[in-house]
Amino acid sequence: MAQQSSSDTRNGAPGASPARRALSAAQDLERKSSAVTLSDMEVFIFPELMYSLVLANIMSPRIWKWREDPWFDGAEQLTPYRRITRLKQFIMDHYAFNLDLDTWGLTTKQTEIDRFKGFIDTGALAQSNALFGYEGDKYYFDIDIRTHFGLDKYEGDTIPYWKTETVEAMDAFCYKPDYSTGAGECVSLAALYAAALFIVGKVPLRDIFLMATPLHSQNFVDVGQGILTNNRRLVTKNMWFNGTALSAQARRALENERVTVVAHETGWMHILFPEATMDPEAFGRFSGKLRKFLQSPLTPELLGNFVRHNSELQKCFQARWRNFGVDKYIEMEKLLTYERDFPYRFNDDTRERLFMEVAGEDFAAHAIPDRIVIDDLEQLVKQQRVDIRTPKGFAILVDALANSCPNSQNAIERLRSFIWTEPRLPDPRTKTIRRDQEPLGLELGMEREEVIARLESIRDGNELADLAFYAYRDLNRVEATPYLRAALERCPVAIAGAERLSDDALVAKIQAMPSESIYDEPGRLAQPDEVWNYGRGDGVEKAVLLADVLRARHPGEALRIEVKADLATLVAPGRTVSLPSTKGLREQSWDCGG
């Protein structure tokens, strides 16, 4: 394993802090190096890393620069919701959703199990993580979720590294072929949104909650009735129930998966781990607001949205139109095809105009057998104010419709699920709450320098703050060993990509790359696979990339990187490669062999 031969005292290279979980030195190093890599698996094992990435993004100058963009001129005068929607459009314009599982290379299930067997039971892992066979509930079995996400192409023991990107790594996707903007996967976008909501949207961190399920990550924002971030988009409560294809996508995770991790400024709570650090009052506020967001009384409009949302159940319904004193009937699925061609909807005040567009031959003269007349169901809901969430209300609807449709009970069960999603959250009653974390203390109105100073000051008392500096990868603030371990053990893309190059050709290719880091600031370093994927890097980053590939090719050979403020020199058997650097790192020597 790579080691740092110089002392780890800093400028910002802390030892173990008393606020951390009871970890051995080896386990603490695993966690620190995981903060550098930020793979899906690592964030699952160390849930504190999710919020540490948010803090790393908050420290980054990138998002603070967004405030200077003309798009946000006058945003401070807008309502919180309007500020958030303006932020949404900025993210939509500048970032794509990326789910290319090969971006960060491959590992094996056994490698990851061996890494983390001291942290989690492998059986629980298989039930909670997509990379280890998770299929979720019946819905996911039905759609073959591993095929849906492309995981089925990995045979046997092979799985992808599903890495989370910092804002800088997201921005750098524009350097990859076929990308014209930045990009990121769901955890990256959730962390980006959380940081941007604080910096640009002026939303207090106390009102931002991050949620991860086995196959998705999103945020709940306690503004108004609540807002969900869903990859690049936003979902309001009205949108949650509007029955569109976009809302169906947004509903999928919370309807069908457990929430494995909740992260907040006060800490985290994990569905499998017996301890948690998140403040119980904050968790109670979050869970109560989320549950309220996910349910609504049944109204005629929501009934129509439900029918539109469930294409397979549309065959259970028909609509009635009284025209010139005569009742006519039409299958629901046939009526909805007209909605695609005209700006009218059957469940609002444009229904009559929609009916007027229907061709006469599409109407039936009599009620269609075995179908519920949606008009009658609307009247029942409106007149009796049926609460379908209760057993009594459910029975009223089933009894009233039993003669209309033999499948009425199933239809009503599906309707109840549509208006009432019960999120499967970690249960705080089963957790031991650690209360040893110093508050983050990040408030609206702070400038970036104040934020960084505050996080620096509490590193010994708050694990989220401390680990944020490892995710931030400023080697003038942290020791190099975690960064090097991640770089030399978990960056397979460059090794595979350079497979056909000789050692000399590899050196020449790396030297020819633009000498610019994707990280703007001194001290902060990209990982080898980022340098390879984006085709650029500072001299120190290039030297680590070269060491990563040579170490894989020539196991056991001595490799050393001599680092100075303006130069990085790789020393290998029969080869010395010097590369200029602008990172301003303190002088040190890194042993990269092994």
Image (cartoon, rainbow, N blue to C red):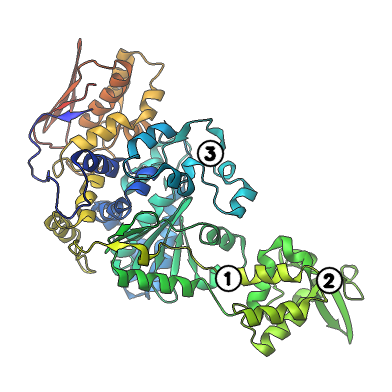
Q: Residue at x 38, y 32 (%)?
A: 111
To which residue does mark 2 refer?
330
Q: Residue at x 86, y 83 (%)?
A: 323
**For residue 241, which numbered disc appears in the image?**
1
Q: Amino acid at mark 2?
A: Ile
Q: Secondary structure at mark 1?
A: loop
Q: Amino acid at mark 3?
A: Leu
Camera-near label (1 vs 3) is 3
Quote the CA–CA distance across marks 1 and 2: 24 Å
Residue 380, relative to residue 557: is it above or below?
Answer: below
Residue 363: x, y in percent? 88, 71
Q: Quadrant of the N terminus?
A: top left
Residue at the farthest bottom position? 383
Q: Quadrant of the C terminus?
A: top left
**In the drawing, does residue 66 fall left or right of residue 292?**
left
Residue 539 or residue 464, whichever sits in front: 464
N-terminal of the pair, mark 1 or mark 3, is 3
Residue 514 or residue 365, whichever sits in front: 365
**In the drawing, does residue 8 fall left or right of residue 393?**
left
Q: Are marks 2 and 3 in contact (CB under 8 Å)?
A: no
Residue 442: x, y in percent? 21, 65
Q: Residue at x 44, y 68 (%)?
A: 227
Residue 323 visible, this angle: yes
Q: Mark 1, residues whose alpha carbon is within 10 Å: few (<14), some, or many (≥20)?
A: many
N-terminal of the pair, mark 1 or mark 2, is 1
Residue 131, relative to residue 528: is it above or below?
Answer: below
**For residue 353, which numbered disc appears in the image?**
none
Q: Secondary structure at mark 2?
A: strand
To which residue does mark 3 refer?
151
Number of dots carrying numbers: 3
Location of residue 105 by image quarter: top left
